[in-house]
Image (spheres, rainbow, N blue to C red):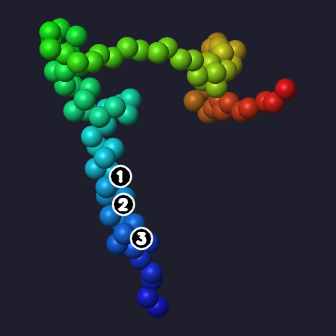
Amino acid sequence: MTREPQFDAEQHAMLAALEEYEAGLDEWGIPIEESMSPLADPGNPESRFHYEVKVRRNWATDAVVEREQDFKDNPSRARTFAPYRVDH
């Protein structure tokens, strides 16, 4: 019996290209060449752009943190907390 390959050559090439692309991104998904460029340096008089930060709140994580507080006096590594959506 001959097994069929998991990926054909085109799919493998696409996965390799995606891996190469993602390797060039920082932890926020911004190209490293851009985020580390002297043109982004606020101290550079020739800078062309800068970065600002938006503060966002993850409500699912907020619910987990809040529920974990109910067990702070009785911690257990066996206990897990999983948020789930509740429609009104």
Q: Nearer the viewer, residue 85 or 83?
A: 85
> Position of 48 compared to 72: left or right?
left
Residue for badge 1: 18
In the rendered image, the quadrant that contains the C terminus is top right
Whole-number angstrom distance, CA of label 3 to CA of label 1: 15 Å
Q: Earlier in the sequence, mark 2 or mark 3?
A: 3
Q: Tag 3: residue type?
A: Phe
Residue for badge 3: 7
Q: Earlier in the sequence, mark 3 or mark 1?
A: 3
Q: Tag 1: residue type?
A: Leu
Q: Tag 2: residue type?
A: Met
In the image, residue 49 above or below residue 15: above
The extreme bottom residue here reads: 1
Q: Nearer the viewer, residue 78 or 85?
A: 85
**Mark 2 in CB contact with mark 1 (< 8 angstroms):** yes
**Mark 2 in CB contact with mark 3 (< 8 angstroms):** no
Q: Position of residue 81 (x, y in %)?
A: 65, 29
Residue 14's tag is 2
Mark 3: which secondary structure? loop
Q: Nearer the viewer, residue 39 or 69?
A: 39
